[in-house]
Image (cartoon, grey):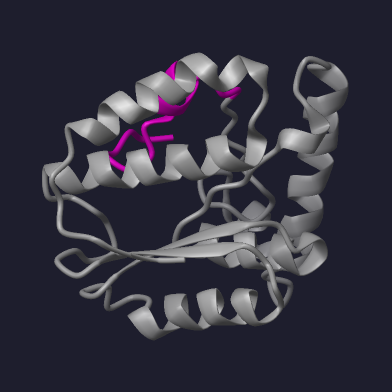
Amino acid sequence: MAQSPRWNLNIFATAGFVTVALDPQGSTGYGKEFTDAIRNQWGGRPYNSLMMSLEQLLETHTYIGRNRITVLGASYGGYMVNWINGHTDTSTLVIHSEKDYRLVVSEGLSTFTALRRQNVPAKFLYFPDENHWALKPANPLCWHHEVLLWISKWTKNDETVESDALIKNIGAKLHVQKDIFD
């Protein structure tokens, strides 16, 4: 996985989380046959692939808490998070930017609204000055701060005390224009 300001997996690991980047059936990089395997099955086959990979991961690494798993995704990954939510109704942090012309902001707001109407805990983080990626220097810091707070809130245990301090330290240094609805 290429590094970017948004998907720096080391930040999640540094905050004390086991961090895994799964590559489901249909993703690019393994040839046309692998990618074409999800034709007309954009959600179902990748979902099954992700769940099989997760089960294998949990069986192999028994120190991972089954009841404290989170999933992150953006763009198509966000679509897959919605698909997973259709099977689990888990708490969801929806992040969207006003200038994202691939996925208009109304899609993020619709997801947030649908979750709240179903009494699923949800929060909406809005970047009015960003596009498909949060790239302005302070925005990735804000993005990671809010994501880490959300993960900590919903996966809390005694071992998250140190990561909470790290997350609060990151947050104390942020002065970013953002709007949060919860």
Residue 81, image quadrant:
bottom right
Residue segment shown in magenta: 1-18
**Nearer the observer, 21 or 179:** 179
* Quadrant of the rendering where the N terminus is positioned: top left
Residue 62, image quadrant:
top right
**Nearer the observer, 147 or 22:** 147
User: Is 52 placed above or below 16 here?
Assistant: below
Residue drawn at (61%, 75%) of the image: 116
Residue 10 appears in the picture as rendered = no
Residue 123's x, y, as percent? 48, 63
User: Is 81 placed above or below 153 here?
Assistant: below
User: Is 102 placed above or below 182 here?
Assistant: below
Residue 130's x, y, as percent? 19, 64
Residue drawn at (27%, 56%) of the image: 133
Residue drawn at (75%, 63%) of the image: 89
**Nearer the observer, 83 or 167:** 167
Residue 125's x, y, as percent? 36, 62
Residue drawn at (61%, 81%) of the image: 114
Could you tell whether 82 is left or right of 108 in the image? Answer: right
**Nearer the observer, 172 or 34:** 172
Could you tell whether 131 is left or right of 63 in the image? Answer: left
Residue 6 appears in the picture as rendered = yes
**Total tally of numbered discs in the picture:** 0
Could you tell whether 143 is left or right of 81 in the image? Answer: left
Tell me, yes or no, whether the highlighted magenta stretch contains residue 26: no
Could you tell whether 88 is left or right of 118 in the image? Answer: right
Residue 143's x, y, as percent? 32, 47
Magenta highlight: main SS: loop
